[in-house]
Image: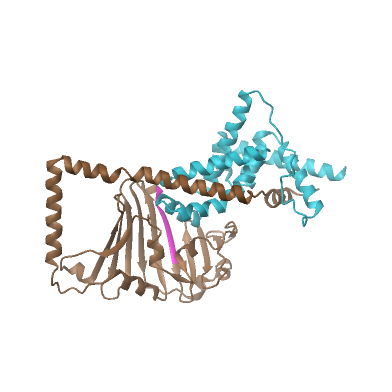
Chain colours: A cyan, B brown
Amino acid sequence: MLEDEWLKWKLRRGSPEALARVYEKYIDAMLTLAMGLLNHRAAAEDAVQDVFLSFARSAGGLRAQGSLRSYLATGVLNRVRDYHRQRQRQATPPTLSNEPVWGAAGPDQAAIVAEETARLHQAVTELPEEQREVVLLRLKANLKFRDIARLQQTSINTVLGRYRYGLDRLRSRLDGEVER
Amino acid sequence: MRSKRAIEETIRMRMNLTLDPPLRNQLLARALHEQKESQEMESAPRGPVIRRMIMRSPMAKLSVAAAIVIAASVILSQWGSPLESVAWADVAERFASVPFFHLTMYIGQDAPAETKKIEIWKSEEGRFRAHEGDKVFFGNLTKKESQIVAFDGVTKKPLNVGGHSPGFLTMLCKEGQFSLNTLTASFPPGVKGITPLPAADTAASRETVLFEAKHDTTPERLTIWALRDSRLPIRMRFEDPRQKEFGDFFFDYSEKKDSTFFDPEAFAHQ
């Protein structure tokens, strides 16, 4: 937070170093969030690209309160919602990516970890959209529940409920597969 | 049966992607380009517009002429002044040698509710402690790979600072030294050349010396107050009237904190 305050201040002064620092600090987290919400690598990269370019353009007049992470995560979420709306208008079913995109797929990674990660990803993908948003915004973007409630335009209790149900579903899904 | 906490940890630790290096570099380059372009668009018209206004209006011409005459007379009145001149380099050098200090920063925009207060203390050993809201940060910047640790100031519980080291404090420091030039370098590239302001021989000016730097094309301005005798800075103020934005930095050298004040372990067990 302290660093973010400083970065925001420097960004308003037009510092390219501050922009590069924000980019390095958050690009991967935002890509992970976008991928979790979209399950489509190319669309996730496009969303993140849009968010950072728009951020760079408006950084001089930045008035964000709170952390940059939550500011950028809000941008990602808005892009994701635009993407879903656009696909609905085009009446195209969402294209799910079959690529093994999660985790480092290098040869040094244990197969069991890769498999577990893939199952986790699949389980997250299958959550209802609102629960998936809450789980990912909370765990991958560190957003506070009250901020998520504002983004979802609902009460904090509803958000807490969605989070609890989301985790329960993930647990039963992952444990169920282990037992099988 | 795994716990909810285990699921949370798995999502936090396992679901991580990285952008491929070529795309990563390409996107950063584009973002920096966008930032530069938007800055240029914002500042470019200002100079000519002001100049055009002055040249068109006879009243504005007269006002500018009057301002030049007043400024010249102030400067001339200093000719042969008994006040010894102080260079900015003397202040920066003196500050680099202070063993400890306390800096209070207020950073804000128009409404008071939006003003942030950040405090930083530096110890003789190069350790730092910073407060922002209810968060407390500790760091040791004399170490090469310095880690910053954070706590909730009320519960004393450790906070995750995101593993981003070295973080805010090291942006202000170079090789373990808090440098005024590093601080002023964070102002816009157009704000250059910190120069002493001429001052009449008054009680205040015998005690303090003022420095100022202005932006080439925007109304942004930096003012620094330093003690004339000790050459120590006591206040820096940055202003951007366009956005009613300011940064006010107050330096204090009067209170030396003991070593436990900078010790995160001691803080956590208080």
Q: Is residue B208 left or right of residue A71?
A: left
Residue A141 visible in the displayed image: no
| Magenta-colored stretch includes residue B44 | no
Which percent across, then down, holds residue B170?
49, 65
User: Which quarter of the rendering shows the C terminus of chain A?
Assistant: top right
**Residue drawn 79% across the image and 40% down it:** A173
**Residue drawn 53% across the image and 66% down it:** B138
User: Measured along the vertical axis of the image, is residue B134 above or below residue B268?
Assistant: above
Residue A145: quarter of image: top right
| Residue toward you, A52 or B1 | A52
User: Measured along the vertical axis of the image, is residue B85 above or below residue A145?
Assistant: below
Secondary structure that dominates the magenta span = strand
Residue B155 visible in the displayed image: yes
**Residue drawn 75% across the image and 49% down it:** B3
Which percent across, then down, holds residue A68?
51, 48
Q: In this view, does A157 lie to the left or right of B187?
A: right
**Residue drawn 48% across the image and 73% down it:** B126
Residue A160: quarter of image: top right
User: Measured along the vertical axis of the image, is residue A85 above or below residue A28?
Assistant: above
Q: Is residue B214 left or right of residue A107?
A: left
* Residue reaching furthest to the right: A180
The magenta stretch is B114-120
Which percent across, then down, holds residue B26?
56, 48
Instruction: Tell me how many marks there are.
Output: 0
| Residue toward you, B76 or A124 | B76
Which percent across, then down, holds residue A10?
43, 54
| Residue toward you, B102 or A70 | A70
| Magenta-colored stretch includes residue B119 | yes
